[in-house]
Image (cartoon, rainbow, N blue to C red):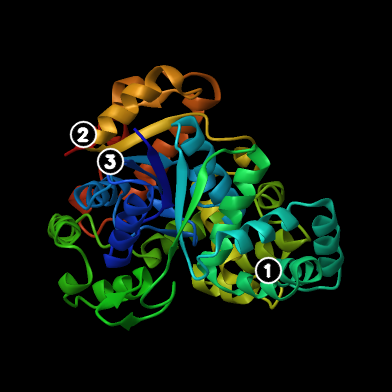
């Protein structure tokens, strides 16, 4: 059976995500299995997810995915480069034949040329040169790409193109044989509003925050899960719920702990530390630390790394295990094939997690503790119990 991978967050699952899964299956073959590597309770933009990862994985499987596995925290809340490399590594370990991604430019040849140029020694030197001039990393990367690829560098101004290039970079660096399958993005942009009955994930979160009806903007099965979780008091979760706990953590950190945060180079950790020790709120810290050079998303991730107690050492290497969150019948077949072939241990139930050793065991335990912190953000205090990650079994369709 052919296996097609998707690296995702589904925060929450909407009609655009459904379209991508359908187009990916059509491109590879109706009989292929769709494997989703999904960020967990905290997402790449440096915030808690709207719903916990088990609910979002259930949404995906009920809407057509065959297997959903977790992208462990260090990669799920990393930069686009780390997010992509972690997802590609897991898909390779599961034997995926293709990687599907949505993008503004569906011409994979152009995106692949950009990706190969950006992993060249020349590009790395050019990026360092432009960074030394005081511009942001995104600007330095685009300028370097412009010198190597001409006008196609402008493709890096679109968020989904950026992720697509990072996926292709990760695949090139690994010598991956996965086939890239680009799905043209349609509807509103990544951070856009609504258009023709479609809404971006950001717009959906805004509407949910306001208590508005989003049933027409989500697949019916996904909306049912959203409604159930909100009724149970396990959602919606928003970043402001972690403000006091995050500020407590920042106020008690040492200089060395600030310096060890990922993305804290170029002296940024000192600026971030000063703001954390003087500002009254987390949003105040981020606003005070932000400059033209340091993007807000980078600062949000730093704050989240600090809140969860991770350092740059935790991002070294590749994900050491695969954790199953949800699956259907084709997903069972994927796991049967991967059981003996995968170089990584596969966690299919809580008991198997306890058998993990070394770095895998340590990382699973830290992810579980992060899940306990996420539970503290639930609207209903009765739902804030700890230890759930050691008892939660995958959703099976």
Which numbered circle lies on residue 31?
Answer: 3
| Disc on the earlier residue, 3 or 1 | 3
What residue does disc 1 label?
Answer: 138
| Disc on the earlier residue, 2 or 1 | 1
Expressed as whole percent of the image width and height from the top left, the position of residue 50 reads 32, 60
Residue displayed at 85% across by 56% down: 122
Q: Using residue 345 as the reference point, say whether residue 210 is left or right of it.
A: left
Q: Residues within 10 Å of mark 3 (few under 14, many from 20)?
A: few
Cα–Cα gap, marks 3 and 1: 39 Å
Numbered disc 3: secondary structure: loop
Cα–Cα gap, marks 2 and 3: 12 Å
Q: Residues within 10 Å of mark 1 (few under 14, many from 20)?
A: some
Expressed as whole percent of the image width and height from the top left, the position of residue 61 reads 24, 46
> 257 and 222: which one is in front?
222
What residue does disc 2 label?
Answer: 329
Q: Using residue 371 as the reference point, say whether residue 274 is left or right of it.
A: right
Residue 17 versus residue 256 in the image, above or below: below
> 357 and 164: which one is in front?
164
Give the number of the mark in front: 2 or 1: 2
Q: Quadrant of residue 378?
A: bottom left
Residue 14 versus residue 374 in the image, above or below: below
Quadrant placement of the N terminus: top left
Expressed as whole percent of the image width and height from the top left, the position of residue 78 reads 56, 52
Residue displayed at 78% across by 60% down: 266
Give the number of the mark in front: 3 or 1: 3
Does residue 167 appear in the picture of this structure? yes
């Amino acid at each position: 059976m052919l296996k097609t991978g998707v690296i995702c967050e589904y925060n929450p699952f909407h009609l655009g995500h459904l379209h991508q899964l359908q187009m990916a299956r059509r491109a590879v073959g109706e009989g292929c299995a769709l494997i989703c590597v999904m960020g967990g309770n905290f997402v790449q933009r440096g915030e808690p997810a709207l719903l916990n990862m088990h609910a979002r994985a259930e949404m995906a499987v009920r809407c057509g995915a065959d297997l959903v596995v977790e992208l462990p925290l260090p990669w799920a809340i990393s930069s686009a480069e780390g997010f992509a490399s972690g997802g590609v590594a897991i898909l390779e370990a599961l034997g995926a034949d293709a990687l599907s991604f949505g993008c503004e430019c569906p011409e994979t040849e152009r995106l692949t040329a950009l990706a190969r140029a950006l992993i060249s020694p020349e590009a790395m030197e050019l990026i360092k040169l432009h960074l030394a001039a005081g511009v942001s990393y995104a600007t330095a990367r685009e300028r370097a790409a412009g010198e190597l690829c001409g006008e196609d560098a402008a493709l890096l101004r679109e968020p989904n193109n950026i992720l697509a290039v990072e996926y292709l970079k990760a695949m090139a660096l690994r010598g991956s044989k996965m086939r890239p399958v680009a799905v043209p993005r349609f509807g509103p942009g990544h951070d856009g509003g609504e258009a023709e009955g479609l809404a971006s994930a950001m717009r959906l979160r805004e509407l949910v925050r306001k208590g508005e009806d989003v049933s027409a903007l989500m697949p019916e099965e996904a909306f049912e899960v959203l409604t159930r979780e909100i009724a149970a008091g396990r959602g919606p979760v928003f970043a402001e719920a972690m403000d006091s706990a995050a500020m407590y953590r920042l106020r008690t950190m040492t200089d060395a702990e600030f310096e060890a945060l990922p993305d804290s180079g170029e002296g940024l950790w000192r600026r971030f530390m000063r703001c954390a020790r003087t500002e009254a709120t987390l949003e105040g810290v981020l606003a005070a630390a932000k400059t033209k050079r340091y993007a807000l998303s980078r600062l949000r991730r730093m704050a989240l790394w600090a809140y969860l107690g991770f350092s740059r050492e935790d991002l070294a290497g590749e994900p050491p295990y695969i954790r199953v969150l949800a699956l259907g019948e084709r997903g069972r077949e994927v796991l049967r094939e991967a059981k003996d072939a995968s170089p990584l241990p596969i966690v299919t139930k809580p008991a198997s997690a306890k058998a993990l050793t070394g770095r895998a065991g340590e990382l699973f335990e830290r992810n579980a503790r992060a899940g306990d912190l996420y539970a503290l953000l639930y609207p209903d205090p009765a739902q804030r119990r700890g230890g759930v990650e050691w008892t939660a079994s995958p959703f099976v369709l």
